[in-house]
Image (cartoon, rainbow, N blue to C red):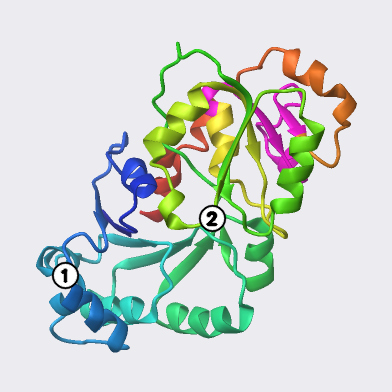
Amino acid sequence: MLYIIYPDVDIWNYMFDGFNIDKPVTAVPLNRNCNKIQLLFRKMFQTLRSDIHLLFGKDMCNGLRKLTDKDSLLICDYTDLCLIKTISANINPSVRKSLWLWNLVRDYKDFEKRQLVIEQCGFKIYTFDQVDAQKYNLNWLSQFLKYPKIDTNASISSDFYFLGFEKNRKHIIENLRKQLKQYDLDFRIIHDSKEMISYFENMNNISKTRCLVEIVQDGQTGLTLRALEAMFLHKKLLTNNRRINEFEFYNSNNIFIYGIDDLVHMDEFMSTPFQTMSEDVCYKYTIDCWVNNFF
């Protein structure tokens, strides 16, 4: 069995709501059954070799302690050393342990210290970004997505749709506004968590646009969800990821690389029909394919 611990947010809940594979998977959100006192203990202590329920709650503790040498554990997007060390100290040492990073490494000195401890605890570390994998000697696995469910008959209300935090991308966003002013733009810049929308709402917005806009952070080469949403939902993609043409699903009819492709050809790009990818190519980027790497 594969036991997965993941952040309790709607995108992860959507991703891990059932798998279409023939192997047993249990996916549990980290904080759902923990009260404020348990969360305080998690912040206060580096490791708790006993009373593990103080950190994770009774149900999760029971699940972790039942893992055997035939089982695997995957922690998604957490580098909390208290969590890592406590779990390692309380589960069967023969359990295969993996950690998946869904964000870029920004503070290398801090990460280097964490990486040493995490690997000493027996975890194999994976990242979605090829450059980070090379820089920090991590294992690379591409971004993944669960097949989105949207209204395929929704009426189109925008030509380009962007949703995301500013993250030092304001100048690119504003340049795009000016360069694409003749089109109908739906650009939604998030400044704090109060402005967040649910993944369901985001999917609804995607269903109503012709082209998704992906603006990766400086130094990022790993795929974002936008690229996969575009491929699965047959939407055009405008991206500044200059290495996206290295992926097998790249097709110049479907993907416009900002900073490489000439904007004078945007009308032609937008009017060219989307060319669907084969099921074999799409499957490689699904969560069902991705999760098989951790058994």
Query: Which three-letter amino acid code belongs to the residue tagged 1?
Result: Asn
Residue at x 56% of width, y 62% of height:
139
Residue 287 x %, y %: 42, 41
In the image, what residue occupies the spot 49% across and 43% down? 144
Residue 108 appears in view: yes
Seen in the image, is 225 located left or right of residue 196? right
User: Residues in magenta?
Assistant: 232-256
Judge whether residue 1 can be spotted in this image. no
Q: Which mark is residue 191?
A: 2
Q: Is residue 244 magenta?
A: yes
Please identify the quarter of the rendering in which residue 96 is found.
bottom left
Q: Tell me the amino acid under the disc marked 2.
A: His
Q: Determine the secondary structure under disc 1.
A: loop
- The number of numbered badges drawn on the structure is 2
Q: Secondary structure at mark 2?
A: loop
> Within 10 angstroms of label 2, few (less than 14), some, or many (20 or more) residues?
few
